[in-house]
Image (cartoon, rainbow, N blue to C red):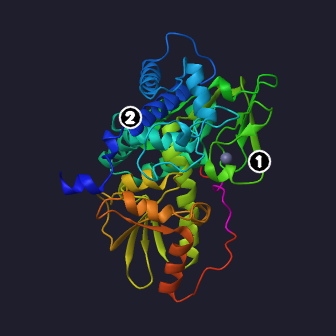
């Protein structure tokens, strides 16, 4: 027998549990984007039917009770921790107790998006096609300011009315330059499941500004991890459903993979500047997140990631493919993730490839910058966790 096979578990993509989980996660994200997980009728969307068939077959082989319908599979995803799904998964692939869907809203949890993008065939759930198009158009016109403005818009304004969409400064020929048309693809009419049907309003999150989702208990829920970490939801601006041509929401992949980390990257950048570094956000049309120049002349390429799963993050870790040169490359996670999952770094290390970026917490990066500038450790951090106002 091959020595490698004797030591390591089955390769990731060949593990049956992994394929099943990727299939269910992809189906759940697509359902949530298309029709919501609450209004389902047969025939089910193809991917959802396939995920249901695969799980049912696997259950039969294991002599376990299968989910008999898509609503039942959704119920599993919202209530049955993944480690109780009876399928074998590689070590540390899942943190015990993890759910794919939020219990009270049946919306995909962040972990669900992470599993969906881990499936190679689900690039449509990734931000890459849209951000790639934006970068190419701006590069062709030699217009980096438009790319920066576009990125800021996605972070600061995940919700727009139709009127906003057509009247944004520069949507035709100004600041957003060649990207005006792209906005109509990436801001879609807000799904009805977000609507307060009695008051006919949508409510934005007072912290991250995406739409809050009503819960089955009459409350509101924010999909963003760091908003969920707070004691309570903070409702922000209300949008009347029928005013100004209707409410549009940034599509899921861009909320998840551009807007949410963008808030963290902007916040990190301002902390690094205060600590004595020179910082450039999204250099070379977004080749990577932040270019940091330290006082001692060292240059870092940094990406801010806030992933639930250190295994999936480790699998994805890769250095930038292009962009301005740097001496070292880091992926940064909030210090809170390491406090909450003490084995986060160890699991990331186990799954990352040789030559991929090192993992570091935001606090450690700020301390490194301060040390290089000769200003000592950071101490208490009072920087706000909310995106700055303005620009649009
Ligand atoms: Zn929020």
Check disc 2 and report the residue beneath it.
122
In the shown orientation, is residue 325 left or right of residue 273?
Answer: left
State the extent of the magenta-drawn residues as a range.
383-389
Check disc 1 and report the residue beneath it.
234
Q: Secondary structure at mark 2?
A: helix
> Which residue is pictured at 50% across the width and 73% down the height?
365
Residue 172 in picture, x, y percent from top left: 48, 36
Disc 1 residue lies near ligand 1 with CB under 8 A: yes
Q: Nearer the viewer, mark 2 or mark 1?
A: 2
- The answer to whether the residues at label 2 and label 1 have Cβ atoms under 8 Å apart is no
Q: Residue furthest left?
A: 1
> Which residue is pictured at 52% across the width and 39% down the height?
112
Q: Is residue 204 visible?
A: yes
Q: Kindly indicate the quadrant of the structure image that contains residue 122.
A: top left
Residue 142 in picture, x, y percent from top left: 33, 51
Between 166 and 231, which is closer to the camera in this rendering? 231
Eyeballing the image, is 229 above or below 113? Answer: below
Q: Is residue 209 magenta?
A: no
Query: Which secondary structure dominates the residues rendered in magenta?
Result: loop
Q: Earlier in the sequence, mark 2 or mark 1?
A: 2
Eyeballing the image, is 197 above or below 19? Answer: above
In the shown orientation, is residue 350 left or right of residue 260?
Answer: left
């Amino acid at each position: 027998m091959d020595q490698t096979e004797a030591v390591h578990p089955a390769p990731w993509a060949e593990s049956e549990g992994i394929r099943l989980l990727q299939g269910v996660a992809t189906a759940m994200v697509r359902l949530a984007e298309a029709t919501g997980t609450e209004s389902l009728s047969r025939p089910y969307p193809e991917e959802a039917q396939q995920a249901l068939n695969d799980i049912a077959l696997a259950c039969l082989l294991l002599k376990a009770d299968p989910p008999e319908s898509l609503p039942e599979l959704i119920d599993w995803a919202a209530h049955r921790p993944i480690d109780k799904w009876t399928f074998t998964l590689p070590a540390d692939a899942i943190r015990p107790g993890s759910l794919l869907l939020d219990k009270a809203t049946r919306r995909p949890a962040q972990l669900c998006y992470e599993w969906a993008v881990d499936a190679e065939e689900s690039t449509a759930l990734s931000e890459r096609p849209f951000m790639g198009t934006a970068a190419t158009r701006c590069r062709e016109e030699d217009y980096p300011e438009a790319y920066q403005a576009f990125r800021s818009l996605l972070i600061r304004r995940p919700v727009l009315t139709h009127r906003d969409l057509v009247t944004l400064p520069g949507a035709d020929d100004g600041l957003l330059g060649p990207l005006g048309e792209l906005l109509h693809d990436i801001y879609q009419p807000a799904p009805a499941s977000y609507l307060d049907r009695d008051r006919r309003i949508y409510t934005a999150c007072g912290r991250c500004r995406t739409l809050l989702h009503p819960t089955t208990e009459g409350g509101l829920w924010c999909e963003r991890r760091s908003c969920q970490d707070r004691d309570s939801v903070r409702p922000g601006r209300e949008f009347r459903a029928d005013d100004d041509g209707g409410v549009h929401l940034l599509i899921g992949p861009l909320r998840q993979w551009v807007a949410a980390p963008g808030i963290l990257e902007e916040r990190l950048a301002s902390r690094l500047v205060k600590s004595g570094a020179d910082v450039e956000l999204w250099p070379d049309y977004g080749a990577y997140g932040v270019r940091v120049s330290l006082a001692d002349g060292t240059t870092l390429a940094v990406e801010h990631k806030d992933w639930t799963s250190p295994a999936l993050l480790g699998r994805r870790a890769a250095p930038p493919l292009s962009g301005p040169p740097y001496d070292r490359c880091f992926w940064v996670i909030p210090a809170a993730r390491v406090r909450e999952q003490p084995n986060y770094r160890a699991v990331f290390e186990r799954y990352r490839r040789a030559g991929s970026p090192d993992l570091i917490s935001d606090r450690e990066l700020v301390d490194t910058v301060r040390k290089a500038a000769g200003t000592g450790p950071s101490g208490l951090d009072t920087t706000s966790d909310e995106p700055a106002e303005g620009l649009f």
